[in-house]
Image (cartoon, rainbow, N blue to C red):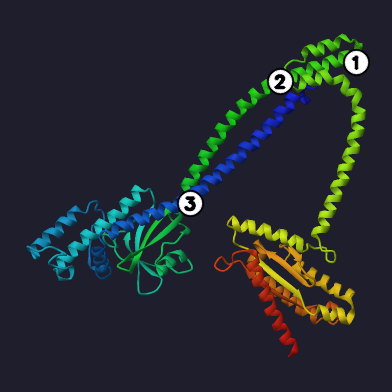
């Protein structure tokens, strides 16, 4: 047989290495991108929460004055004109201090004179200075922490209306030619669109979640920090961060990483192929040439050449030394191998059959109590890992003893199998087990868990339809009670407690059905 370079080991190794390298690099790139974006999402939420808490701490350091400032803002914002383009509050502060000294000489604010006792002009000057200070503080926080938006919201008496008291995105007052700052910006923020915002306000708590939306700043996460002073809710500190551009940067970096890793992998692959060819494939080629020569000339001197080339003590050297013996022993070896393989296959088939019998219910063919116990162990393991969403559906066939006594056990078995088919059809995405003579259990997860109530309603409706179907035999017009329970971390500690609640719910349903039947 002539040597074909297109089918050589070196060529095939190259193709295999290239395929593995390609998929490894691409998959690692995707994994890197998604892990980085997910990590960045969590970092974003933590980042904006920390910024909100930072602004909260600043406000709480001057909380009494901030309460006065907020009260004055909500009552008089329409009467105050503040320059739109100010970039320093010192001028406003100096103006306030000048007016205070003029109208209240020798006095100190907060010591021997309160805000409400000051002259109206002084109050307004103080408010302008204070608003400029806090607006700059919010803007500086926005710039320092590289986020697009910071603001302070005050809910109005009209529910779901919010006043942007401190708006990190300045807006000019209409008809002011862009010279006067617009105050009292008010929006209707409906609950269905801003659920996290209103939950933070109504509960007064720092939530472990953020509001997510697409708006003029891009795809953003918004976090709301309730401001509570002296036990009273004042407003919400809002901080937002935009993630789209960062995700694009992560994608670009990931592509660069893929390119760099690909170059390194290609160089390593070339070096590996050279090494394999130099120290392994070339030996195989020479061994083949020597065997071909021996087959042609039948010269025993070729064996010496083979032994001479069998250096290094590796598997190829051993192969060269044992080539002749392997040919003679091959036939016996293959016979033994076939026989051994046959026995192993038979043994495995028997083991699989025994295992299937041990976990299958003989009557219905579904999994039995033993299999259910294994399922409980699996769900318990998931509970330990933090997975909390599962439920138990308990189904019990009604009047089985009456069917057995009246029509015979064979008809009772028909009723059991008919209920089994119904349960398996309704809970098509859940494992179903027969754990007793007339008892079935379904472990609800994923889609069945989310639509459990709908599935129970569907099953009850089908049972009612069967019981009213006069074309069916009496034992086929089955009746069954079903009870479900979902895992509740407040009351449940294991699968067993959920099972007991489902079982209790089933028996309550059974009593209700018996009561209706008596009536």
Q: State left or right for residue 213 relative to residue 96.
A: right
Query: Which mark identifies residue 42?
Result: 3
Q: State left or right for residue 284 relative to residue 49.
A: right
Residue 240 in the image: state x and y as whole percent.
41, 55
**How far separated are the C-alphas under marks 3 and 1?**
70 Å
Please tell me which residue lies in front, 137 or 437: 437
Is residue 438 placed above or below 196 in the rendered structure? below
Could you tell me which secondary element the residue under label 2 belongs to? helix
**Among the two numbered marks 1 and 2 on one chain, the one whose residue lies closer to the N terminus:** 2
Q: Which residue is under mark 1?
A: 295
Quadrant of the snapshot with the C terminus: bottom right
Seen at 83% across and 66% down, the residue is: 364
Q: State left or right for residue 314 relative to residue 349.
A: left
Could you tell me which secondary element the residue under label 1 belongs to? helix
Q: Which residue is under mark 2?
A: 277
Residue 387 in the image: state x and y as whole percent.
60, 58
**Among the two numbered marks 3 and 2 on one chain, the one whose residue lies closer to the N terminus:** 3
Query: Which mark identifies residue 117?
Result: none
Q: Is residue 471 visible?
A: no
Quadrant of the snapshot with the N terminus: top right
Residue 445 in the image: state x and y as whole percent.
66, 62
**How far separated are the C-alphas under marks 3 and 2?**
49 Å
- Identify the image quadrant of residue 225: bottom left
Q: Dot 2, how many residues are within 10 Å of its Cα: few (below 14), some (14-19), or many (20+)?
A: some
Q: Are discs 3 and 2 less than 8 Å apart at CB?
A: no
Seen at 63% across and 23% down, the residue is: 271
Is residue 360 placed above or below 285 in the rendered structure? below
Q: Dot 1, how many residues are within 10 Å of its Cα: few (below 14), some (14-19), or many (20+)?
A: few
Residue 105 in the image: state x and y as whole percent.
7, 63
Could you tell me which secondary element the residue under label 3 belongs to? helix
């Amino acid at each position: 047989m002539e040597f074909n370079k297109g089918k050589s080991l070196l060529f095939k190794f190259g193709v295999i290495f290239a395929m593995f390298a390609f998929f490894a690099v691409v998959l690692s790139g995707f994994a890197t991108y998604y892990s980085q974006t997910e990590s960045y999402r969590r970092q974003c939420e933590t980042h904006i929460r920390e910024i909100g808490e930072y602004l909260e701490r600043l406000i709480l350091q001057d909380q009494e004055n901030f309460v006065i400032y907020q009260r004055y803002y909500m009552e008089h914002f329409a009467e105050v004109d503040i320059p739109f383009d100010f970039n320093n509050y010192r001028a406003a502060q100096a103006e306030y201090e000048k007016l205070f000294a003029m109208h209240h000489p020798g006095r100190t604010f907060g010591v021997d004179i309160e805000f409400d006792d000051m002259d109206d002009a002084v109050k307004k000057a103080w408010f302008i200075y204070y608003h400029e200070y806090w607006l700059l503080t919010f803007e500086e926080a926005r710039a320092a922490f590289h986020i697009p938006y910071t603001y302070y919201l005050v809910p109005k008496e009209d529910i779901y209306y919010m006043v942007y008291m401190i708006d990190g995105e300045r807006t000019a007052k209409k008809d002011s030619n862009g010279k006067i700052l617009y105050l009292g910006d008010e929006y209707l923020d409906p609950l269905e669109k801003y659920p996290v915002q209103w939950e933070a306000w109504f509960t007064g708590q720092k939530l472990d979640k953020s509001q997510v939306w697409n708006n003029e700043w891009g795809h953003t996460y918004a976090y709301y920090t309730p401001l509570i002073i002296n036990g009273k809710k004042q407003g919400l500190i809002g901080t937002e961060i935009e993630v789209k551009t960062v995700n694009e940067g992560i994608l670009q970096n990931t592509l660069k990483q893929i390119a760099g890793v690909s170059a390194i992998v290609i160089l390593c692959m070339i070096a590996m192929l050279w090494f394999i060819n130099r120290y392994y494939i070339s030996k195989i080629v020479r061994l083949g040439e020597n065997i071909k020569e021996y087959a042609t000339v039948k010269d025993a001197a070729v064996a010496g050449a083979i032994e001479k080339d069998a250096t290094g003590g590796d598997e190829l050297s051993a192969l060269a030394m044992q080539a002749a013996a392997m040919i003679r022993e091959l036939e016996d070896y293959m016979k033994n191998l076939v026989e051994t393989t046959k026995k192993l296959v038979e043994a495995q088939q028997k083991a699989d059959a025994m295992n299937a019998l041990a976990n299958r219910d003989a009557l219905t063919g579904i999994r039995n109590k033993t299999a259910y116990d294994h399922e409980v162990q699996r769900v318990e393991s998931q509970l330990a890992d933090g997975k909390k969403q599962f439920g138990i559906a308990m189904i019990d066939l009604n009047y089985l003893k009456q069917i057995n006594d009246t029509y015979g056990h064979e008809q009772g078995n028909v009723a059991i199998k008919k209920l089994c088919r119904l349960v398996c059809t309704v809970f098509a995405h859940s494992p179903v087990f027969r754990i007793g003579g007339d008892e079935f259990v379904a472990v609800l997860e994923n889609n069945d868990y989310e639509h459990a109530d709908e599935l129970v309603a569907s099953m009850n409706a089908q049972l009612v339809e069967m019981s009213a179907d006069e074309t069916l035999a009496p034992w086929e017009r089955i009746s069954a009670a079903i009870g479900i329970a979902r895992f509740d971390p407040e009351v449940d500690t294991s699968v067993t407690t959920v099972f007991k609640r489902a079982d209790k719910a089933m028996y309550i349903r059974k009593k209700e059905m018996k009561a209706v039947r008596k009536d």
